Image: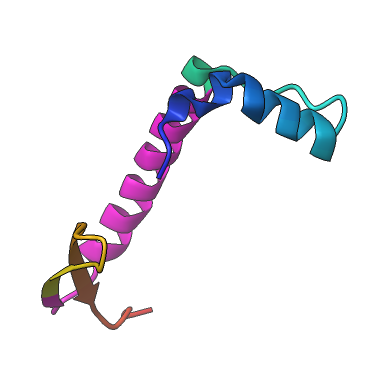
């Protein structure tokens, strides 16, 4: 639950240097670009799969954690025809 800018944090760089010396941590823009590409790839794959589905069951739920954080879940279930 941390922002992408965590990669610019000195403490994050120190931690990774300790865990894997020599690892070059990507910059914030690189991480954003990678996440954007991954989102497009996942969206395309899900869209392609859902085109062949005849019926979908959708459920939702809303709850609040003990620390008063609100959560919303959305689930779509289907049987893959292939």
- Percent from the top left, x then y, of residue 10? 63, 19
| 59 left or right, relative to 22 | left
Which residue: 81% across, 40% down?
Answer: 19
Magenta residue span: 31-59
Q: Quadrant of residue 39?
A: top left
Instruction: Please check the rendered image and state whether residue 63 is part of the magenta-colored stretch, yes or no.
Output: no
- Percent from the top left, x then y, of residue 47? 26, 54
Split into 4 quadrants, where in the image is the C terminus? bottom left
Please tell me which residue lies in front, 76 or 80: 76
Residue that lies at the very extreme toward the front in this rendered image:
67
Residue that lies at the very extreme toward the right in this rendered image:
21
Instruction: Please check the rendered image and state whether residue 32 is part of the magenta-colored stretch, yes or no.
Output: yes
Which residue: 73% across, 26% down?
Answer: 14
| 19 left or right, relative to 29 | right
Q: Main secondary structure of the magenta part?
A: helix
Please tell me which residue lies in front, 76 or 9: 9
- Percent from the top left, x then y, of residue 16? 74, 33
Figure check: 29 above or below 18: above
Q: Quadrant of residue 32?
A: top left
Figure check: 68 above or below 4: below
Which residue: 64% across, 29% down?
Answer: 12
Q: How many marks?
A: 0
């Amino acid at each position: 639950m941390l922002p992408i800018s965590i990669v610019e944090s000195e403490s994050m760089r120190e931690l990774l240097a300790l865990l894997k010396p020599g690892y070059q941590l990507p910059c914030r823009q690189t991480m954003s670009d990678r996440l954007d590409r991954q989102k497009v790839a996942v969206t395309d794959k899900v869209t392609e799969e859902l085109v062949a589905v005849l019926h979908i069951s959708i459920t939702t739920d809303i709850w609040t954690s003990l620390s008063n954080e609100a959560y919303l879940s959305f689930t779509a279930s289907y049987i893959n025809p292939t």
